[in-house]
Amino acid sequence: MTSIKIKNFGPIIEGYTENDGFINIDKVMIFIGGQGSGKSTVVKLISTLLWLEKGLFKETILIKDITENDAFQNIWCEYQSIQNYFKENSFIEYKGKFLYFKYDSGKITLKLIEDSSYSLPKITYIPAERNFLSVLEDLENVKGLPKSLQWTLDEYIRACRSQKAPIPIGINDISFEYDKEKKETFIKGNNFETLKLSEASSGIQSVVPMINVMYYLEFFINNKKINSIENLSFLERERYERLEEKLLLKEKKNSRDVLFEILKSKVLPQHLFTIVEEIEQNLFPESQREILINAFIRVNNKVDNHLILTTHSPYIIAYTTLAMKAFKVKSITDDESILKKVDNVIPLISTIDSNQAGVYQIDDKGKIVSIISKKGLILDNNYLNNSLEKTNELFDELFDLEELCK
């Protein structure tokens, strides 16, 4: 299990308080907390270390590129704008399948691990600022964006260019379309014929880049013609040939077909690792549900897919609890009539195993706490539910005062 430990980094002070401080990077992870509590800090650090692990594995990054001249802080963390989060006593420890990394008060320890279970991920980081991309009129000539947002824009452009047909965005009957000649983005449906994306509601503007990129990357991973050895770059082809020679010597007992599959897992992305900030951004509760279900279906499409979310929405937490409960019911029955009824509540293909999920809240003192109960459901006593309860208490107080006035 890949895991990470963080202390005294940005707003994260104490860090996680269980499991010797290590947060397991589960198939599905959700972080909640107040503004500036550190949700994005954690997921940005995870994404950075995933990128480094992948780069080291592909040999596009060398160990010295990370350890020398404060490169980890000033180059790699700068990509996610967290380079100024370091303190004198900052501590980061990452245990991956290929990379062991520790940053302890400025000193870096880095080791590569020969673990045959490591396969290349396609890592996607979709920031909260994504709705900005929807109002751009000339996508392909935009320059000067923050690096993480520029990456999202680049993937968004690739997704637009590869589009063969309108893409349903998961809200009502609305679909997204890209005019390759005019290089303009449109939406259709919901009682209108065609509308520029820049003229659409803020919720739709937030959803389109996210869904379009996720749709494209899933297509990329599963398309054997695109995600193929034949489409490797010159440098990747050289690495492929070196690996082929090594495997032919090491794996003499295996057939060429088996060797080819092993090679593919070493040079081609095999699964998706998707990180989305504020997945609920600008969306009505019912739309939040549809978008979340869509994301859960995608993460369930492959065993090794991962999904990490940050959220301020109690609805996202409620719908996740629903998906976990549905998985529990699904796992204890073979009765088709019951399974059909469960599917009517929430699609069976979107249910989430709580044993493969982590839901955490971060307080204003930088402490991270798991809010999944021993029964495998999200605790009612969490910040988002407590905020709603506090509002209800204030309403009751006003109601009592109103009664005194009569």
Image (cartoon, rainbow, N blue to C red):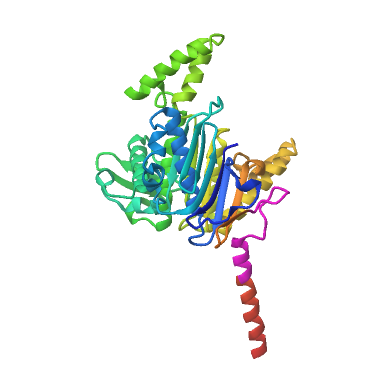
Q: In this picture, which residue range is highlighted in magenta?
A: 370-390
- Please indicate whether residue 159 sits to the left or right of residue 387 in the image: left
* Residue 283 on the magenta span: no
Viewer-side residue, 366 vs 230: 366
Can residue 251 be seen by looking at this rendering? yes
Residue 343, position as x, y percentages in the image: 64, 43
- Reply above or below: 153 against 312: above
**Residue nearer the viewer, 208 or 170:** 208
Look at the image and say whether residue 388 sits in the magenta stretch. Answer: yes
Q: Quadrant of the N terminus?
A: top right
The quarter of the image holding the C terminus is bottom right
Q: Position of residue 123 (x, y in %)?
A: 45, 38
Q: Residue furthest bottom?
A: 406
Q: Residue at x 45, y 58 (%)?
A: 282
Q: Report the residue at 62% width, 62% height from top.
A: 385
Between 205 and 102, the one nearer to me in the picture: 102
